[in-house]
Amino acid sequence: MSKGPQRIRGTQDIWGEEADRFQKVVETFDRVRRLYAFQRVEMPVFEATAVFSRSLGETTDVVAKEMYTFLDRGGDSLTLRPEFTAGLCRAYLSEGWQQLAPLKIATHGSVFRYERPQKGRFRQFHQLDAEIIGAEAAAADVELLVFADQLLHELGIADGVTLQLNTLGDAETREAWRAALVAHFEAHRGDLSEDSLARLDKNPLRILDSKDVRDRPIADSAPAIDDYLSAAAADFFARVTAGLDASGVAWTRNARLVRGLDYYRHTAFEFVTDRLGAQGTVLAGGRYDGLIESLGGPHTPAVGWAAGIERLAMLLDAPAPPQVEAALVPMGEAAEAAAQRILAELRRAGIATDMLFKGNMKKRMAKAAATGARFAVIIGDDELARGQAGLKDLGSGEQQDVALDRLVEALRGR
């Protein structure tokens, strides 16, 4: 094995069947987002660090521990994107996209987090992302959820995946609930874990997410948001659930599903599966009506979701390998020279073709069969002299001579 440079821990070299699964996820996402009239956007891989520290919050694990942040040669602090939403909101402000609101956009690509690598989790990984910016109606939440549901169905992985849904309420609801949670957790301060004590002052909602066994009984007995829902927030959630029911999308209520950051409002959701072990979330999102304000913009309602491409790909059945229709087998120098022209003609005509030019005839024909090609196109000195090629059906073994200028027609007709 080579002693040269090794792959960096937490990165991937994706190829073969794994690459085919990855590509199927991306192609299906691109096809479905067109059905929903979402525009494709491409975003920078890095942003000013403040874009993420202001949007994700200085106290979150992503900002405090996981971001790839560096000074560039001009002395500016830059960060490789750990997610897409903050950069999309920055672009919404800086590129004048406000005039296009409500804006439906979708993107995909690499994101970077310095985490402990494990199954389905990498330091450079890939996400799909869909957002509706500038829409305050519950119908926008419904559209994104139906989009996500259709994506999972068209990928063939919807079985065993459950949509968990919750409301985080409006600002009035959230303030009242937060105060009740703080009072509850303060009463149990002596029994909380160190992490939860740190969160109590800055981000009390995140205690509800704690996996620490010391915190679970306290979190499970915490006040429920439904006791503090304003009439307006309850009505918004009812419109979301009614829209999902009308669209035929199954959902289940998870009243403990939260988002710690203050700019999240109303709908929060996760599509979860039990087929990936502990890493059960395959797609997640919610409404973030206060995020663009945190970046210095005007109040702008918005909702979106992201999904890990690797996690979705892990759930796929192995896709069929790329189909080669013809394997070109030239025998002799003259045939190899002629084969370059024939190869180009076949490919330009839309016929997937590979060329095999090493080994004796028997080895080449074995390789032709191994490519999965339906036909072998055999060219030797005798065939060239007659202006023909031997066209062999690799399934039946039948072979016939075909004029070189009729080769495209012969292959298309089969």
Image (cartoon, helix red, strand yellow):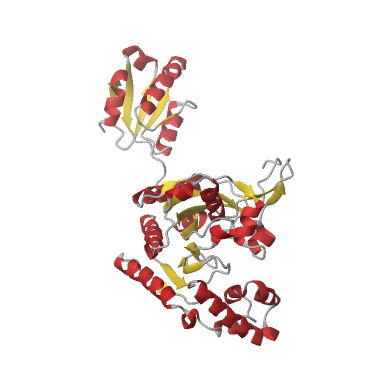
Q: Residue at x 37, y 48 (%)?
A: 34
Image quadrant for the N terminus? top right
Is 223 located above or below residue 333 in the figure?
Answer: below
Is 360 located above or below residue 319 in the figure?
Answer: above
Along the viewing direction, whichever of 150 and 92 lies nearer the viewer: 92
Along the viewing direction, whichever of 112 and 20 lies nearer the viewer: 112
Q: Residue at x 37, y 51 (%)?
A: 32
Q: Describe residue 164's horizontal placement relative to residue 297 as left or right.
A: left
Along the viewing direction, whichever of 279 and 85 lies nearer the viewer: 85
- Can residue 208 be seen by looking at this rendering? yes
Q: Describe residue 313's horizontal placement relative to residue 178 as left or right.
A: left
Q: Residue lying furthest bottom in this view?
A: 187
Q: Position of residue 49 (x, y in %)?
A: 66, 52
Q: Position of residue 178 (x, y in %)?
A: 57, 77
- Can residue 331 be seen by looking at this rendering? no
Q: Position of residue 268 (x, y in %)?
A: 47, 68
Q: Residue lying furthest top in this view?
A: 385
